[in-house]
Image (cartoon, rainbow, N blue to C red):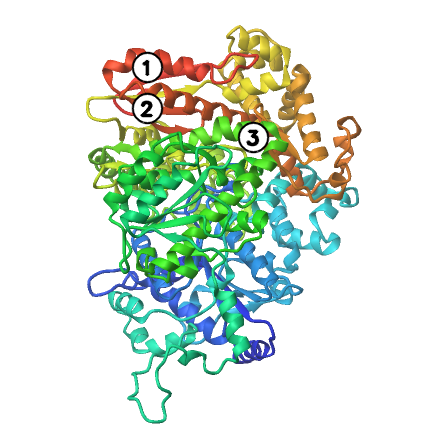
Amino acid sequence: MSQTSSNQLTSDSALLTRPVFILVDGHSLAFRSYFAFAKGRDGGLRTKTGIPTSVCFGFLKSLLEVMGTEQPQAMAVAFDLGLPTFRHEADDTYKADRPGTPEDFVPDLKNLHELLDGFNLPIFTAPGYEADDVLGTLAQKATAAGYKVKILTGDRDLYQLIDLDKEITVLYFSPDALKRSTSTITEFKPEQVKLKLGILPSQVVDYKALCGDKSDNIPGVKGIGDKTAVQLLNTYGTLDNIYAALDEIKGATQKKLADGKQDAEHSHFLASIKLDVPIEVNLEDCKLTGFDTSVLTPLLEKLEFKTFLGKINELQQRFGGTIEEAPKPETSKQIHANEDNDLWFFTAEDTAAAQKQSASPIQPRIIDTEAKLNELVKLLEKFTNAETPVAWDTETTDLEPRDASLVGIGCCWGTELDEMAYIPLNHKTGDNLNQEIALKALRPILESTEYPKALQNAKFDRLVLRCQGIKLAGVVFDSMLASYVLNPDRSHNLADLSKKYLDLTAKSYSELVPKGKTIADIDIPAVANYCGMDVYCTFGLVPKLREELEKIPTLHKLLLKVEQPLEPVLAEIEYTGFRINTDYLKELSEQLETDLAKLEEQAIEIAGEKFNLGSPKKLSEILFDKLGLSTKYSRKIQTGYSTDAATLEKLQEVDETGFVDAIMEYRTLSKLKSTYVDALPTLVRPDTQRVHTDFNQTVTSTGRLSSSNPNLQNIPIRTAFSRQIRKAFVPQSGWLMVAADYSQIELRILAHLSQEPVLVEAYQNNQDIHNVTARLVFEKEDVTSDERRLAKTINFGVIYGMGSLRFSRSTGVDKTLANEFIQRFYSRYPKVFEYLENVKKQAIAQNYVETILGRRRYFDFTSNSIRKYKGNKLEDIDLKKLGNLGASDAGLLRAAANAPIQGSSADIIKIAMVKMHEVLQNYQSRLLLQVHDELVFEVLPSEWSELQIQIKSVMENAVKLSVPLVVDVRAGENWMETK
């Protein structure tokens, strides 16, 4: 940044009346920090002991520079989780070409997280979303709370968030900013974006929809480059206006736009940053209040950041703290110490008001003696009415139940302000009750179904108690699950539910527990109030949520018959874990290393020069310049021609050198190695020798389960080599691994819901549905394997709203022929088309659609052309008259058509899990995992013959449809062998 622009930036900041909130794009800054130094002669910054520090140093340097310029009052950092997001679900090529994470980046990033914690900077992430979406959501919340928001990033995607009315700008930095002594961080407002891209921030998403984004594999409209995109947007303003005026646009551009409309809408969806990510945010936690020097100093010493250590007092001030001075000796002028010393400057009215404000609205009973405990147990034994279940909660030192110390237990049995108790067990100070004595006294209540219980996120407390030897029973209400059933897309955390239904605001965990501490460090009365308020709110939520559920009986039944019975099943799966053969993975990693080296040598030999296989630019030069492959199979981007997965697949058919084959296999194996083969062994717990995933029951909009830490639902199976990873998943020694999966469950559900006679008859007669479709679409009796493959693509594609363009792209069929196939499909299966159209109309008319069991997914459309039909009869809605919908609403309609199918599939396998859990109570064998339409078990060999029949029967009869459900059950020595 020039001296002039720097002064201007400072001048602008000085004029602000609103406090400044800096949002940091964590992964963007971390990667740019890494590569800014990794390309140096020394290969990056390291300590004397070899600890990589490029990320930490560059990140902190940039952070301090911006803080010095902007003088923020609040800050937060957003990171990606490295897991698939809703964009990956919509497009499996999204970001597929990005190179693997460098080996020394991972420990550097881990140290960065510790460093940020040391500075008391909050970190935000969200499963299923990217950091950009988290930043967008935080920006909206912060500006609504009165902040001026500035987003520090090196990613131009975030330009779309710039909004002068809301005072949101972007602080854009280049990698050079990390090396130079002068700043190269520039504040971007609309005029800077206009100078840089030729468009306004509000047009950034439409711009990407037109010309795409190579770095993220966003396709855009084929043949439309950035210059044309800018011209079109400057003429017509928006993507919708461009397509509305398509007849005015002449020549090749008109044809490209017409042919690429679906790609434009899809790209618009991928490029749009979400502003409503369901994350729990307390903006008070983001205020800069300084840090604990005793926590931060060892971190800086470990990283050998001597410069920062020498300026620890300056850092403290910059982060909003105060410098601790040595205590001065008392003099006669000092005020004598007394309990009201710090209140002397308040008036009596001020003091009374402050004391009233800080007073707790509840008076929990602290159970710190055996006498009090016995009295509490006698009291709790009276509560056996399921209409008013006692609310329970546990307080622990860790979110991982196996690593957690049980600090205390809370319960609430009424609405009076003293009808709750807190049992302190492992606080570091104060009078704790002996844990063994307490649990022995509570066991008859906690383990009995005769004493109904209500919890918020019962699975966590169940696992905590399980690790302490208590098997929780009698849970009749889970407020988090009830909220999820009522509307999956809203917030389900206790704070938001309490505010919404009870108008109560409780102290947050971060307000109670300082960074670097645990709840065991907090005094007993403070935790009693905190835990007491949690159980008080949970108790109060039960009648409120039940009242809503009773208005929609199908949802109430879904909670009682599916979601709540599933919770202990998931807890058991998490507790059991999955055994991993780490020796095998080590061998596989070594084999991969050898294979990757051979592939690299092969590619270099064919190219005739040494090059970095991870460089798309260099790869483009070799493919199209050196090897002379036609660029018609690719698309033009800023650095040359795209070398994404779709391009390589097309080039593979015409490349006779074997170069493309080598590159594609190299990319595949490299990703498998870093993501699974090398990562899984690090996640095995030493005490159980198993991997323990977390199942998320309240995350997806469709009702499906998701898995995290690690995500075992994404273990690949598509290729022969990727299937070898499943070989590492093994049962208990001497046992069998068993997998049972539904055959074509979503197509069977479609047949049931649409009542399409051809599909129903085919399934009832156990016919090959893909052969049936192929015969109808190709209008002949004998079909080839290729024709069956095309029919299979259509069958499954229709469920997800696949049009002719996507069908053409995924199969290589000519667009005209692809359109003809799709039209034939709908003409042969008219009931399918009618059903899918009706579901879209239902979404428009009532803003939600339902599964077979009545699970709802809600849709919030933005287009006036759709919103005006809310409340109308289905027959009064003509989808053809909706006009050119925005990409967002078009995507929502496709999701609406699919939601009953995908949601019903989720419901069916959940019921199967609950029923199988009941069956397994009579066996030693265990359920280990659920992956979409598949259940995985470890089975004692002597139980296999019985369970093979039981598993198949239970799963096939989980829900009765008008077509049969079919389940394949197979056994092997490992997961791979079950396929």
Q: Residue furthest bottom?
A: 332
Mark 2 closeness class: few <14, some 14–19, many ≥20 residues within 10 Å: many
Q: Is residue 925 left or right of residue 903?
A: left
Label 3 to label 2: alpha-carbon separation: 30 Å
Residue at disc 1, secondary structure: helix
- Residue 899: percent from the left, percent from the top? 58, 30
Vertical placement of 702 versus 414: above or below?
above
- Residue 357: percent from the left, percent from the top? 52, 66
Quarter of image, res 916: top left
Q: Does the CB distance between marks 1 and 2 fall below 8 Å?
A: yes
Residue at disc 3, secondary structure: helix
Residue at disc 2, secondary structure: strand
- In the image, 964 versus 597, the foreground residue is 964
The residue at which mark 3 appears reads as 556
Q: Does the CB distance between marks 1 and 3 fall below 8 Å?
A: no
Identify the mark nearer the N-term, 1 or 2. 2
Q: Which mark is residue 325?
A: none
- Residue 487: percent from the left, percent from the top? 58, 38
The residue at which mark 1 appears reads as 947
Q: Which mark is residue 937?
A: 2
Residue at the spot x=41%, y=51% of the render? 531
Identify the mark nearer the N-term, 1 or 3. 3
